[in-house]
Each structure stands twice: as structure tokens, then as C-alpha cells.
Image (cartoon, rainbow, N blue to C red):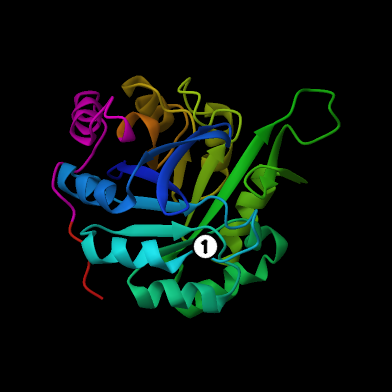
Amino acid sequence: MKEIRIIPCLDIRDGRVVKGVKFVDIKDARDPVEAAEAYCREGADELVFLDIYASIENRKTRMDWVRKVVEKVTIPFAVGGGIGSIEDMKALIDAGVDKVSINTAAVKNPDLIKAAAAEFGRDRIVVAVDGLKNPPGSGRPRLEVVIKSGNEPTGMPIVDWARKIEKLGAGEILLTSKDADGTRDGYDLEMTRAVAEAVSIPVTASGGAGKLEHLYAAVTEGKASAVLAASIFHFKEISIKEAKEYLKSKGIPVSMDIPVKKSK
């Protein structure tokens, strides 16, 4: 097993880190630059910043907070939200962003994944997938892809989409369960495992982390390559060090070193 990455997720709205439950009930958490600096010091392996209202508001990721983060962050990080073209990605990468994360735009135009991988290399391309679990007899896929911050169902089975994402050249998948998001009841292990077993690229589990055992379950039962969390880290309920020490004690390989961002 490769080393499991621990990734704090910072949802951005109006230049602030926020956190909600099931993609709604959004509350302010902290300043993104302050948060980024803290997580770098604490030993996070990577960071993910998501401009969560960009797609809903039909706008691009706001570059003001991105530039401020670039100046301070010392570990690899990805930015997503409102990215709909190669030009959008280039602007972010040129500004110093390590990876770009696309979601709604990829569903609307899958060829964007292929073009982006060819232009920037697959290691820089993350496809974020938001999933919803439907009940039996609903007439919809058991595990369904949703877009527009979870507000728009697609009718597309999540495993089919994951396989297509890999085939088109993405380097990794960031998988979030809308049902589990912000609940702190644990990751959707059924969804995570279904996607992780369907592809060979890394899958990051997202949505629902509330205690250390949830991180362990995402790796052992969900087969995730990385675990992403927000609330437990933002509100200092669990530290990055505690998470890594716990996983290490359970036999999960993690890096205890402070990652250093690769020079461009």
C-alpha cells in the first residue's frame, strides 16, 4: 500500500473558508490564507480549495484569494470551482496552483478532461465527482453523479463516470458523497469502494469525516488512496498529526514529514 495522503479541504465563499452540511447550511470557518499556513505547519500532505459557489453563480474561480494563498502555501494544492476551459486552468497553473479540479464542466464536456491532460499532464488534473445515493426502486442509479454543487442530478451511474474519467486521462478522482457531507457520520464507504475498485487512479474520499475511525475505514473498507476532511480540521477537533499518528498505529502507511512543494 502506498502512503495515504491526509488532505484538508477548504470550501471558499466570498473569500472565506466555509463549511456546510449536505452542501447547504453554510457557516464561516476561517481565513483561507491563515488556514493554509496552519495546515502547512501541521504536516498536511496536500490542500484542496473549492470555490463552491462558482458553478452555481456561473462565474470563474476568483483569483484574488488564489494569489494570496499561492504566496504563503508551502505544500502542493489543488483549486476547483468555476473552471470551464483550458484557459481557466492555465490562469491558475500560471499563478502557481499545482493541480486543477474540474467537476460540472467535465460532466458537460468530457473531452475537456482529455484536452487538459494533454496540455498540462495528467498529474495536474483532478476530476471532482459529487455523488448521491438513491433508494431501491427509485428508477435512478443507486449511486448517481450530481453537479452544480449537488443541485442537479445527471442520471449517470457514478462507476460508469469514474471509468470514463480515467480513460480520458485524469490523474485522480476527488469523490464526495452529498448525503454524507458535513454530517460527521463517516464517509460513504459503499460509494468510495465502488469507485476505487473500478479505477486504477487514486481516489480521495470526501464527505462525512467525524472521528479518527472514519479515516481508517475510508482506507481499509473504502479502498481510498487519500482522505479529505474539513470540519474536524477547521474546528481543531482533530489535528493532522493526530490523524497521521492514529493511522500509523493501525498499520496504515503515512508520511510524518512536512511535505515541500515542488519548484515549478
Instruction: Answer left or right for 115 relative to 15.
Output: right
Residue type at numbered disc 1: Ala
Query: Element type at marker 1?
Result: loop
Q: Is residue 31 above or below residue 136?
A: below
Along the viewing direction, whichever of 102 and 72 lies nearer the viewer: 72
- Percent of width and height locating residue 118: 51, 77
- Residue 56 visible in rendering: yes
Q: Residues within 10 Å of mark 1 (few under 14, many from 20)?
A: many
- Percent of width and height locating residue 53: 57, 52
- Residue 98 visible in rendering: no
Q: Is residue 181 above or below residue 200?
A: above
Residue at x 22%, y 25% (from the top left corner): 246
Residue at x 14%, y 49% (from the top left corner): 258
Instruction: Answer left or right for 119 relative to 153.
Output: left
- Percent of width and height locating residue 154: 76, 47
Instruction: Answer left or right for 143 relative to 96.
Output: right
Residue segment shown in magenta: 234-259
Q: Quadrant of residue 120?
A: bottom left
Along the viewing direction, whichever of 249 and 20 lies nearer the viewer: 20
Residue at x 24%, y 37% (from the top left corner): 253
Q: Is residue 129 above or below residue 65?
A: above
Is 7 contained in the magenta span?
A: no
Instruction: Answer left or right for 56 relative to 183.
Output: right
Which residue corresponds to mark 1? 170
Quadrant (top left, top right, bottom left, bottom right) of the N terminus: top left
Q: Is residue 216 above or below residue 28?
A: above
Q: Quadrant of residue 74?
A: bottom left
